[in-house]
Amino acid sequence: MDGNGRWAQKQQQRRIFGHQHALTAVRETVESAVELGVKYLTLYTFSTENWNRPKEEVDGLMNLLVKAIHDETPTLKKNNVKLAAIGDMSRLPEGARKRLEECIATTAENTATTLTLALSYSSRWEICEAVKKIVASGVEADKVDDKTIEDNLATSGYPDPDLLIRTGGELRVSNFMLWQMAYTEFYFCDILWPDFRKKDFQEAIYEFQQRKRRYGRV
């Protein structure tokens, strides 16, 4: 979900202004996913690298996260959306972590779509953590295979992503699900995230549906 800062600059506002207006894009994307029958939707919300941003912006993002989760919980329940999270939750402020845990518990029985927030997340962090778990469990080196690693990733139990949508005109994956995206289709668009709407999500899904996925086969 890229382009919040540039969107704010175009409005001659601080970066946090862009993050605030990005919530509309999140809401419409989640609603569209439910309407289209998308079972899993993961939003790259805050990377481990984002902790290096100015303290004012990070604090603003954390406060916004708490408010957004609180405000959106009733809508998630109404739309039968289950909330989940992946990432290093220990780095989140206590208030944000508590609110997140409450919403996850409240929506745990919902079944339409699983909405996962990647918070304080990076793929390299995730893979390092998986290796640590495997080593700690005493698995012999020659017994480690794809499934061993997958079972120890933060996304264990989730299907690999079919489609990656990247907004804002950037053409990179930015340390996101590097292991899981071995056969993911990529979709890039120039729309800054705060301007992303249902029709844009639907357009990405439509283009994905036109592609033939061969998984290395002829």
Image (cartoon, rainbow, N blue to C red):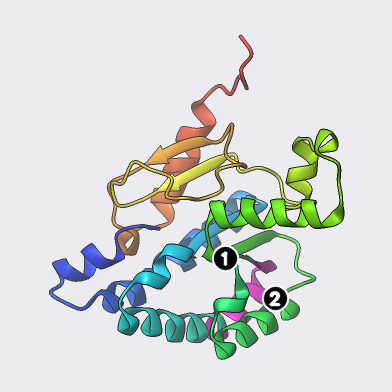
Vertical relation: 216 (above or below) 59? above
Q: Using the rendered view, name the quadrant where residue 195 is placed.
A: bottom left
Residue 119 image offset from top left, x and y in percent: 54, 68
Distance from Cα at disc 2 to Cα at disc 1: 11 Å
Q: Which residue is mark 1?
A: 117
Where does the C terminus fall, quadrant-wise?
A: top right
**What residue is drawn where x is 61% and y is 62%?**
116
Q: Is residue 106 visible?
A: yes
Q: Using the rendered view, name the quadrant where residue 23 is placed.
A: bottom left
Give the left or right position of residue 161, taking residue 61 as reference. Answer: right
Give the left or right position of residue 50, taking residue 82 as reference. Answer: left
Residue 143 image offset from top left, x and y in percent: 85, 36
Vertical relation: 18 (above or below) 163? below
Q: Secondary structure at mark 1?
A: strand
**What residue is drawn where x is 66% and y is 74%?**
78
Seen as rendered, the residue at the extreme bottom is 95
Q: Which residue is mark 2?
A: 104
**Magenta-colored span:** 70-85
Residue 164 image offset from top left, x and y in percent: 49, 44
- The residue closer to the viewer here, 177 or 25, is 177
**What residue is drawn where x is 64% and y is 69%?**
79
Please state which amino acid type lies under the numbered disc 1: Leu
Residue 14 numbered tag: none
